[in-house]
Amino acid sequence: MSGKFDKYYRKLAGLSYHVSQGNILNISGSASIGGGKYKEIHVSGAVNINGDVAAEIVEISGSAIVRGKVRAGTLNASGSIEIESVECDRVQIAGAVSIYGGSISVKSTLEIFGGLTVNGDIHSGGKVVIKGGFKISGSLKAKDVYIGLSGSKSTISDGIYSERVVVKREGAKTGHKIIDKLLHLFGGLGTGKLHTKEIRADYVDIEYTACNHVYGGVVKIGDGCRINGEVIYRDSIDISSDSFVNNYRKADIDE
């Protein structure tokens, strides 16, 4: 009897979800559930999750609010996404993304297309690709960083630290029709500028970037940059005539 009432109230509330054999959670339509551990989570529609969730695979298409941490092997999401914090092996998200409570920690690859807000740091053991407009309140640390600027202004408050950093105003086109429409929606193509504290990397190739300091091996300062402090390079430097650099010098042996 209790199962019949549960099914009845779920139907009244517009909820449609079930856990299939193998501990796979499937949600279609609209649902509000608690956190938990699953093998896989698949969402098509709208979901509110109150608590931490863990799964090997998390796939979301639509909208999701997670009032907790998402731990997963792979997180793939498109649409409107709000998550307290993320700890995954691999992440790909397209749409409007808000990490409102903490940081993003990824073991390998992080790809975000659209509008991004992170109320903390981004750490990745591999490559980070961000295309669109974004606001990161902390730092960005990764092995390899590629930023495709779109929108009026993007910020990384506490700096970028990587082996390789490339920042381009390239229209943030991906070749994927749906993702490119989202990128156009979140600020327009090819009009962005990055503001950050500093950039430290072995290889630096930037344009339309404003920061205080740049430290690198090979350093390329492209069009539209403003470096208010100092650029220190070890191997080579190339500065566009369209950019302002307050001062630059070759690194000392012990630097």
Image (cartoon, rainbow, N blue to C red):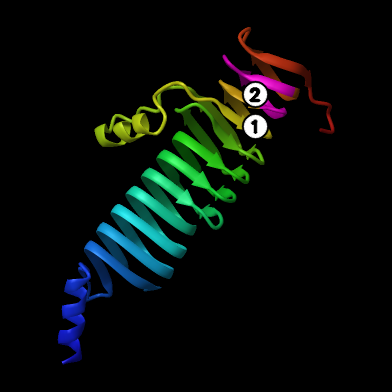
What distance separates the C-alpha of mark 1 from that of mark 2? Answer: 6 Å
Q: Is residue 135 left or right of residue 112?
A: right
Q: Quadrant of residue 3?
A: bottom left
| Residue that mark 1 sits on | 202
Residue in front for this viewpoint, 127 or 155: 155
Residue in front for this viewpoint, 220 or 47: 47
Q: Quadrant of residue 255?
A: top right
Q: Position of residue 162 (x, y in %)?
A: 61, 39
Q: Is residue 243 visible?
A: yes
**Which tag, 1 or 2, sits closer to the chain's start?**
1
Dot label at residue 57: none
Q: Residues within 10 Å of mark 2 (few under 14, many from 20)?
A: some
Q: Position of residue 159 (x, y in %)?
A: 65, 38
Magenta span: predominant SS is strand
Q: Is residue 154 left or right of residue 170?
A: right
Q: Residue furthest front?
A: 12
Q: Amino acid at mark 2?
A: Val
Residue found 83% across the figure and 26% down from its top = 252
Q: Position of residue 141 (x, y in %)?
A: 60, 44
Q: Secondary structure at mark 1?
A: strand
Q: Is residue 20 visible?
A: no
Range covered by the magenta-colored residues = 211-228
**Contact between labelled residues 2 and 1, with CB atoms less than 8 Å apart:** yes
Q: Residues within 10 Å of mark 1 (few under 14, many from 20)?
A: some
Q: Position of residue 14 (x, y in %)?
A: 20, 67
Q: Amino acid at mark 1?
A: Asp
Residue found 84% across the figure and 33% down from its top = 254
Report the number of discs: 2
Residue found 53% across the figure and 36% down from its top = 145
Residue found 60% across the figure and 45% down from its top = 137
Q: Is residue 184 above or below residue 48?
A: above
Dot label at residue 218: 2
